[in-house]
Image (cartoon, coloured by chain):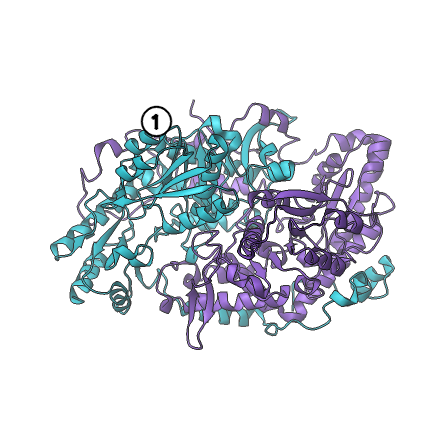
Chain colours: A cyan, B purple
Amino acid sequence: MDYIPNTDVEREEMLRAIGASSIEDLFSDIPEDVKFNGRLNLPEAMSELEVKRHMTALAESNAEAEHYTYFIGGGIYDHYIPSAVSHITGRSEFYTAYTPYQPEVSQGTLQSIFEYQSMICELTGMDVSNASMYDGASAMAEAGLMAVKIRGKGRILVSKTVHPEYRRVLETYAAGMDIDIVEVDYKDGATDVEDLKAKLSEVDCLIVQNPNFFGCIEDVRMLSGLIHEAGGLFIAVVDPLSLGILKAPGDYGADIVCGDGQALGNPMNFGGPHLGFLATREQFVRSMPGRIVGQTIDNRGNTGYVLTMQTREQHIRREKATSNICSNQALCALAATVYLSLMGKKGLKEVGEQCLAKSHYLAGKLREAGFSLAFDKHFFKEFVIKLDGDVSSVIDRLLEKKIIAGIDLSRFYPELKGCMMIAVTEKRTKQEMDELVAGLEGLR
Amino acid sequence: MRLVPLIFDLSREGRRGYSLPALDVPMVDDVIPEEMVRTEEPNLPEVSEADVIRHFTNLSELNHGVDVGFYPLGSCTMKYSPKLNEDVARLAGFAESHPYQPESVSQGSLHLMYDMEKFLAEISGMDRVTLQPAAGAHGEFTGMSIIRAYHEYKGNKKTKVIIPDSAHGTNPATATMCGYKVVEVKSDGRGGIDLEKLKDALDDEVAALMLTNPNTLGLFDENIGKITEMVHSVGALCYYDGANLNGTLGKARPGDMGFDVVHINLHKTFSTPHGGGGPGSGPVGVKKELIDFLPVPVVDYDGERYYFNYDLPHTIGKVRSFYGNFNIVVRAYAYILFNGPDGLRRVCENAVLNANYIMENLKDLYYLPYDRYCKHEFVISSKWQKRENGVRTIDVAKRLLDFGIHPPTVYFPLIVEEALMIEPTETESKETLDNFISVMRQIAKEAKENPDLVKSAPHDTPVGRLDEAAAARHPVLRYIKK
């Protein structure tokens, strides 16, 4: 079986119409020396049932959030996704469409992106948003390149409290563009202001994550003031889910805001797909990478939506484009739009409050049990505790209780050996948190 | 059809579409510094769940997707996306798992990634593959970054990348992002690369040639072996843009043609749905001497366990967080298992058959710039219609919408005047192709007899022709509460 409707009889009819003697004839333009005459060394075809069985077995050998309790974060979180989200993203008119090149038959995708852009602007306090990027890391890298294009100095400052993988992606993006990436140290879990001040000359931008990778809240207003005094742009990387309760980056002077939208209604997916978002001030819109949807009217006088400002993009400008990004993550952006519609301003605030209350409850219980927090800082839904022993063996022992405990921070920060980062979403119950505390106590 | 108001217009204060469990721990105050507390609420809509479902369901009905009708959008390979893919991707073990959970409880996913790498290496004729790039253009960026890192490591002074005039727009944009100057090379009379012009462009400063084969005209470059040899002779590498892989799947492999780096668009060739513009996935394959430059991690197997290997001596680093669009890879993996080696070869054969069949049946009424067998797609032109009746390609495209058919790619490649790039794919039946042919023939007839009917199309879509110039001149890019 395959997904090909042509029958043998039809194939013959079609070949005759073409004037070809055989299917092979259609490939006569491929020279013999590069033709592949063998048979691909792949497993033999399976039926649908066999594929399902095989893949179910693979899936069942993984831990997942239906049978394990997740306290692990680091950029991907086990948040609750209302049922309505997947029912909408599962509508094939959305998921089997392409990029909306023909707006007359793509208003569903286009309007949903316009709504997405509007919501991202509301959350971040920015004027314009693009239609989404691959993920938070690539969105941040593109934000950095954008700042260099605007300011033109070729030097980016990034705090070491920014997600380590995001910084690694930024370095890869900067490598070909002759851009210096300068990292700013951290002190007690937040950007080290003295080190920053020492590095502030001739820079295009400062990138700070808030809450940062450790979950700590940075002194963003002060940091933003410092970089602006030095003539650079302030780029804030944020958890969009925190913005129901935390100040909008636009209100503390951010010029570009980016981050990962997984928390907004997208499954963890072992790290992807999800979406990156990127928003900025109106004055920088023409330097922004990625697609943008705009409102317009049709020749009947109706309001409609189109891809706009395409003269920034690679299919028009080719080597002069703002970026090579072509597709966005439209279906993941749709999930975020549906999620934000369902939650509304009150719901988003409540999710944020629950993450805050629960993470503080767990941190409090761990303190009572004699554990100490690595940093004396305000935090949102994620925090770092010090363990006495080897973190990875603690994580392995808790697995036996079906608990995915957290991240061994020494994998990213060797100096934080013995530290484990714990994330608490609104899904975690008091009972699950008490079990984690008991489990950790039992391992001492 | 009824147009849909914005979700913001449905908002009523106090209405809600969510419910969370009651908080089972004490509420906290004063744990966030006061200046960081949000005081002004974001203007998100306040709507009920039914409002949300109706709103987005109504929006979905304004969209054309492959499940709705024929979608012959050239170079985008809009084949049918099997439902099996969607079911397996939703298995909790894939969808509800975290990238940093211990490897001991991620063996299923690691096994899948390991297998998938092997499959794609075999299909492309390469030695190793990274699954990390999130889309085709992201794969190009990854591949060209590898090429740059390789030359830097070797101490080669390279400044230029050669790209044919028929290339996808992402190619020059990518080369520029990687710090190279773009040198464009013209195509010859048969639609391939002009060997003389290539020879003139080649020198010691050329880092790479970026090429797709079949090219964007849908034509297989018969000189490909010669071309890659010429490029290698100046110490440059050959980059294969895999956007058109459906046209050679199981019939010719980029690795055998002499390419050193390849990206593959899983959402095209391997049937993962395009999602209205993503998520896609753009794995990159390389030849042996480039393996050490791949992004980290790659998945390896020690005889007992699969594990992430971060130890590549000259790695370019990371191009994306975590491991790429993993759950898109899951869908493509299901597709490869379902088809097997013979099924994949049939995919290519039938995609090529379908394309040639349409081409043959339209070439008397539309100008065909290169009359030779095409691969999975071909380019025709409305230049006769434009010259004789002022009907342009955009008009033909819009008229197709009235017949429930998504138009082909228009005005691309740039080297063909009034281009229409048609790719039917293997999943369309002869009836669908015949219907498309008869509609295209009718439009050619209308263009002669009643050109205004075509020029004023579409007549039967939810909205009429949209004013794109106005949208760019006076940008309205978000809803603002009145």
Q: Quadrant of the C terminus of chain A?
A: bottom left
* A416 left or right, relative to B357: left
* B396 left or right, relative to A54: right
Q: Position of residue A319 (x, y in %)?
A: 62, 39
Which amino acid type corresponds to the residue marked 1 in the rendered image?
A: Glu
Q: Residues within 10 Å of mark 1 (few under 14, many from 20)?
A: few
- In this rendering, the count of numbered labels is 1
Subunit ID for the residue under disc 1: A
> Toward the viewer: B147 or B67?
B147
Q: Position of residue B452 (x, y in %)?
A: 79, 29
Q: Is residue B142 above or below residue A113?
A: below
Kindly identify the residue that appears in the image at 45 percent across and 39 percent down. Answer: A144
Q: Which residue is tagged 1?
A: A229
Q: Position of residue B291 (x, y in %)?
A: 54, 63
* B423 left or right, relative to A84: right
Q: Quadrant of the N terminus of chain A?
A: bottom right
